[in-house]
Image (cartoon, helix red, strand yellow):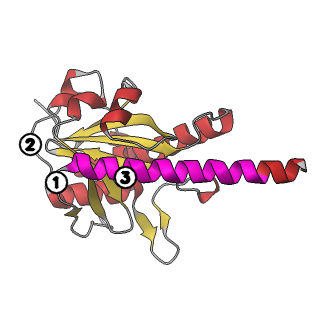
Amino acid sequence: MSLRRTLIITAVFAAMALTAAGGAAAADQAAAAGDLQTIVLPAPQTSGGMPLLDAIRTRQSRRSFAPDELPRETLSTLLWAAWGINRPESGQRTAPSARNRQATDLYVVLAEGAYRYDHQAHALQPVAAGDLRALTGRQDFVQSAPVNLVYVERMPEESGDPQLIWAGSHAGFIGENVYLYCASAGLATVVRGLVDAATLAQALHLPAGHRVILTQTVGFPGS
């Protein structure tokens, strides 16, 4: 058997294994979601806001958050700005990705449960019921802040430097969109790397090959 044929067969079996793992994980998420329902978000605000240079000038990390929930309209625009579709004709999005792979999934952890952002439907798909906010980081404020975002990269279990660099870059691009939107909307945010990624991945029932890269907290500024 030629080397090329061997590599093709190996790739096919790897893809089949990942597909099977993904199906099992989806079933786990559906079971863990319990009575949580899909949240269809209102249309996001896609124009206006603070001028870009003003948003860059005022962008900052904050670690004090009020516990108040974000209005659905604000959450909608936040998620669209982070990783939504800004060119419907092509399906391309608000942040760049290597080779346009769009391999990052955005999870949203709220007080009642965790959801995956469905950019095509602009909706939140439930993945786990219950308050998982404390698992999104090691700082005390994550437990009471209204929104914790989790950036998850779909990548092979054993990934080399290029894939890891791309994964970090993707999370960084999306996270900076969140920073700029928060500056414009008067919200507080901070991106974080201090997280038990393995425990969080288990709580979210992530498929094999899906890796937690970064988390980011969003809410109204605390006192």
Q: Quadrant of the C terminus?
A: top left
CA separation, marks 2 and 3?
31 Å
Say which residue appears at 41% left-offset and 34% top-offset: 214
Pick the front one: 168 or 136: 136
* Label of residue 73 in the image: none
Eye-nearest disc, 3 or 1: 3
Amino acid type indicated by mark 1: Leu
Amino acid type indicated by mark 3: Ala
CA separation, marks 3 and 1?
15 Å
Q: Are marks 2 and 3 in contact (CB under 8 Å)?
A: no
Circle 3 SS class: helix
Q: Are marks 3 and 1 in contact (CB under 8 Å)?
A: no
Pick the front one: 97 or 46: 97
Image position, residue 7 (x, y; %):
79, 48
- Above or below, comparing residue 110 to residue 61 in the picture: below
Would residue 157 appear left or right of 50 to someone viewing this image? right
* Label of residue 68 in the image: 2
* Label of residue 26 in the image: 3
Question: Label 1: how many residues lie within 10 Å, few (<14), some (14-19) or many (20+)?
Answer: some
Query: Can residue 183 be seen in this snapshot?
Result: no
Eye-nearest disc, 2 or 3: 3
Say which residue appears at 23% left-offset and 51% top-offset: 185
Give the magenta part as a residue range. 8-33
**Between discs 2 and 1, the one toward the N terminus:** 1
* Label of residue 36 in the image: 1
Amino acid type indicated by mark 2: Asp
**Between discs 3 and 1, the one toward the N terminus:** 3
CA separation, marks 2 and 1?
20 Å
